[in-house]
Image (tube, rainbow, N blue to C red):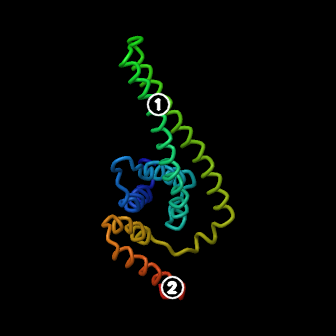
Amino acid sequence: MLFGNMQASLSCAIFYELLWLDFLPVGTFIPPHMTAATFSCLLLVTHFGLDEPPFVFLALIAGLPMAWLGARLDRTMRDRLNRSYSGVLQWVRKPVGENVPTQLILRTLIGKALVFWLFFIILNGLLALAVGSILMDYSGQIASLKLEWYQFWISASIGGLLALRLRSLYLSVGAGAIVFGILRYIGIF
């Protein structure tokens, strides 16, 4: 994956980066877990040897749920860390032993690593099964799609436009998407 298909790898990473440009991790907001989505997509691209844009598009779409599920898991883990923090505060008020903070931090780090890796491995296994099934049943239809990389990047760059936070821009993007969809349906594009 690292030195394999660099165009597909960079194209997937650019797609996700542009897509979530609007989400800024400010305050208590937890943005979509872009790393989980990107690695899931790259895992599927590498595992199935997907080179052509229509097939990579399938991997891009399959990786999207990992971003939202990863963010939900991150929220759950943060709530759990708050309980651990409470344990450290209790120890500061009444120190019981010297190793208590070290044990709490080590337990938290190991638990978080295990949970995230299990989440990543199990869900990517399920994604690989689903994508493999789709490829077996619909590879002809997927291959017939006329998709190119620039289409992915243009559609994902809407995230950058939405980051401007202008109501008139939102309306323009929505109207443009509807017009483009109609023109595409008619066969002009």
> Dot 1 surroundings within 10 Å: few (below 14), some, or many (20 or more)?
few
Q: Compared with residue 56, is residue 4 higher up or lower down, i.e. above or below?
A: above
Mark 1 and mark 2 lie on one chain; the one further toward the N terminus is 1
Which sits in the foreground, 113 or 148? 113
Identify residue type, mark 1: Arg
> Dot 2 surroundings within 10 Å: few (below 14), some, or many (20 or more)?
few
Q: Residue placed at 47% from the left, 38% from the top?
A: 79
Q: Residue placed at 56% from the left, 38% from the top?
A: 118
Mark number displayed over residue 83: 1
Question: Where does residue 144 sit, x and y in percent of width and height?
Answer: 58, 74
Which sits in the foreground, 49 or 158? 158
Q: Residue placed at 39% from the left, 50% from the top?
A: 29
Q: Compared with residue 24, is residue 122 higher up or lower down, i.e. above or below?
A: above
Task: Identify the secondary structure beneath mark 2.
Answer: helix
Mark number displayed over residue 157: none
Identify residue type, mark 2: Ile
Q: Distance of mark 1 from mark 2, alpha carbons?
A: 52 Å
* Left or right: residue 54 compared with residue 17: right
Question: Where does residue 188 sit, x and y in percent of width and height?
Answer: 48, 88
* Left or right: residue 165 compared with residue 9: left
Instruction: Count numbered badges in the picture.
Output: 2
Question: Where does residue 49 sit, x and y in percent of width and height?
Answer: 54, 56
Residue mark closest to the camera, 1 vs 2: 1
> Toward which corner of the image does residue 168 lie, by quadrant?
bottom left
Q: Residue placed at 41% from the left, 62% from the top?
A: 19
Circles 1 and 2, Cβ within 8 Å, touching? The answer is no
> Toward which corner of the image does residue 109 lie, by quadrant?
top left
Which sits in the foreground, 1 or 82? 82
For this orientation, the residue located farthest to the top is: 97
Name the residue carrying label 2: 182
Question: Where does residue 50 sit, x and y in percent of width and height?
Answer: 53, 59
Which sits in the foreground, 87 or 13? 87
